[in-house]
Image (tube, grey):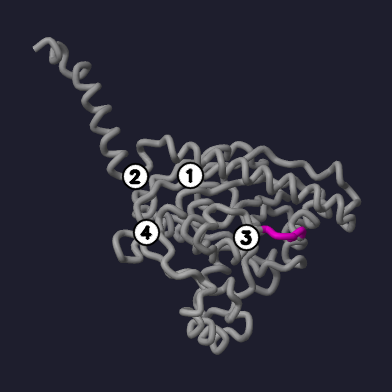
Amino acid sequence: MASPVDWTPPSAHLIRAANLALEPWRAWTSPVFHGLANLPDHGPALLVGNHTVYGVIDAPLIFFEIHRARGIWVRSLADHVHWQIPGWRTVMNVGGSVDGTRENCRALLDAGEMVVVFPGGAREATRRRGERYRLQWEQRLGFARMAIEAGCPIVPFGTVGVEEMFTTIVDPDSRLLAPGRALGRILLGERGGRDDMMVPLSRGIGLTPVPRPERLYYGFGKPIETTPWAGRADDVTAVTEVRDLARQAVQDIVDDLRAEQADDPGRTPLGRLGRGLARSARALPRVVPGLVSR
């Protein structure tokens, strides 16, 4: 697109088609959402959260649920490499995603948009074994600097469920995947050879890549106001304080969602079926009076 603000939200027809396409995935994952009321009624705002492995498995449901519940189309900052892939970049553009540069972020916030940011970026989406749900923001400060500069709130959010769908067999930085990195350089230039551009090889159900039918959990926390740091966007201490507040808030949400997941008997289809049968059995005496006494 010519400008990040030069974008028209999807038509009603396209929304219906996309929602219909997502229905099997919703049935497979039975997602639950918490805290959507914490989103402001309008932008500008930064929605900052964790990426899960592969990145795109849980993200679409976030955008459509926010639109369904709040009537807001959020925009998204994404890794530069997305726009080097023919066809896929068209999908990203139609969905309102933009190349994740400071200039694009600044333009969207100036236009009053709500913008989704994953500070962990590709590094979290291509995580290795032993890094499940670990926030990998390293020393990234850009989103906090943008929020202070715009004077907008940061809404922390977390996602849980995707990591349990897969078991990693080969880590993305393994020598076994060196041919894939070489092919990436041929197709996408040096950027395509980055370790964080190579996804891990995983298995889902059995030895197949089909994801296990785990429930997805989403949570949105209370906004973090950045006005106390107004005028300090170039102050590393101030920016680091805001970054650390957001990171801790996201980590707390992820921890809470993992606790909910661990105690949820309905996290899998079999568990949900069992709960449904139990509810039906409890309801029978009310539907057929005297059934128990007989």
Q: Which residue bears the numbered disc 2?
A: 268
Answer left or right for 290 relative to 92: left
Disc 3 marks a residue whose amino acid type is Ser
Q: Nearer the viewer, residue 109 or 162?
A: 162
Q: Quadrant of residue 5?
A: bottom right
Tell me the element at label 1: strand
Q: Which residue bears the numbered disc 4?
A: 211
Q: Quadrant of residue 187?
A: bottom right
Q: Quick one: label 2, few (<14), some, or many (20+) residues within 10 Å? A: some
Return the mark for residue 76. Answer: 3
Distance between mark 1 and mark 3 Cα atoms: 20 Å
Sequence-wise, the earlier of marks 1 and 4 is 4
Please state the horizontal and vertical placement of residue 232, each as a whole percent of the image. Answer: 89, 52
Disc 1 marks a residue whose amino acid type is Tyr
- Tag 1 and tag 4, C-beta contact below 8 Å: no
Sequence-wise, the earlier of marks 1 and 3 is 3
Please state the horizontal and vertical placement of residue 175, each as a whole percent of the image. Answer: 50, 79
Q: Which residues are magenta?
A: 137-141
Distance between mark 4 and mark 3 Cα atoms: 25 Å
Sequence-wise, the earlier of marks 4 and 3 is 3
Q: Which residue bears the numbered disc 1?
A: 217
Give the residue at x 50% y 48%. Answer: 160
Q: Residue furthest bottom?
A: 186
Instruction: Kindly report which numbered mark, 4 or 3, lies closer to the viewer in this rendering.
Output: 4
